[in-house]
Amino acid sequence: MAEKIINAFTVDFEDWFHGIELDPTTWDTCEDRLAVGTLRLLDLLAEANVQATFFILGAAAQQAPDLVREIASKGHEIGTHGYGHEFVYRLERECFRRDLERSLEVLSGLVTEPIRGYRAPYFSITPGCEWALEELAKCGLTYDSSVFPVQNYRYGDPTAPRWLHQRASGVVELPPSTWRFAGRNIPIAGGAYFRIFPYTLTRFGLLQANTAGHPAVFYIHPWELDPAHPRAIVPRRVATTHYWNLRATEPRLRRLLADMSFATAAAVIEQHGPGHS
């Protein structure tokens, strides 16, 4: 009998202002809303009996250390999202390593389980940044979920493999899910796409991965479950994706958690990764 495919439920743990490209020097003036969406998300995951992977931004962990401890205490996997939410392709290699090491230092003081996974801010490991995967391996990380096989104005590599695979660095890559249609990779992995596209399309696209024998990889941010978070003055393209249809996130997530089987990224790699027979 075929083994049931489980899918990765992942969370980019950051506050509403971290990923909206506001000047980091203004972060201290922004309203702290991190607990609002996180607690709602933890309740949804508990209702569905799902354990997820939280890629924790180091700056957010320092902002809310007790919240990180609570996430870990509920059995969720803790990964790193770097420290300062910077585009990897804008960093020099040494700056990237310092950012990564700083995030791991913060997390090591909050959780006891080893950190195995990384997700770059803005999925910003793009062609030419393969050195970042080598740095992950040097820091003891075993998997990455940063290379999004799509074309986006901020990130992506549409030529990258769509399924779980091992890189030359030895790091396992767990790409966010796409649906192949008309010769293109359509991003259906979560985030703004989860709010912009009809729920039926997201579900169909994720299930297509399972039909092809692969796990789907879904992601969400805590602030997406907090429609009342502040409205920043940012470029229209940024505002549209950030604020679009936020009220749909919670009911859609409840449906998705009921419709599909999810677990941590580590559990998915254990089931489907290199060496699995």
Image (spheres, grey):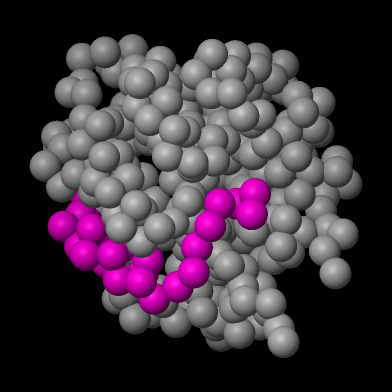
At horizontal 21% and vertical 65% (from top left) the residue drawn is 251
At horizontal 71% and vertical 62% (from top left) the residue drawn is 271
Q: Percent position (x, y) of residue 130?
A: 77, 40
- Residue 161 is a magenta residue: no
Q: Classify 50 as above or below 138.
A: below
State the extent of the magenta-drawn residues as a range: 242-267
Q: Percent position (x, y) of residue 192?
A: 34, 57
Q: Classify 185 as above or below 70.
A: below
Q: Is residue 219 visible?
A: yes
Q: Is residue 99 visible?
A: no
Tell me the quarter of the image containing the C terminus: bottom right
Seen in the image, is 80 located left or right of residue 66? right
Seen in the image, is 77 located left or right of residue 213? left
Seen in the image, is 160 located left or right of residue 119? right
Number of labelled discs? Answer: 0
- Residue 257 is a magenta residue: yes
Seen in the image, is 133 located left or right of residue 249? right
| Quarter of image, res 184 | bottom right
| Quarter of image, res 70 | top left
**Which of 21/204 is in front?**
204
At horizontal 28% and vertical 49% (from top left) the residue drawn is 43
The secondary structure making up most of the magenta span is helix
Tell me the quarter of the image containing the N terminus: bottom right
Q: Percent position (x, y) of residue 276?
A: 82, 63
At horizontal 69% and vertical 77% (from top left) the residue drawn is 3
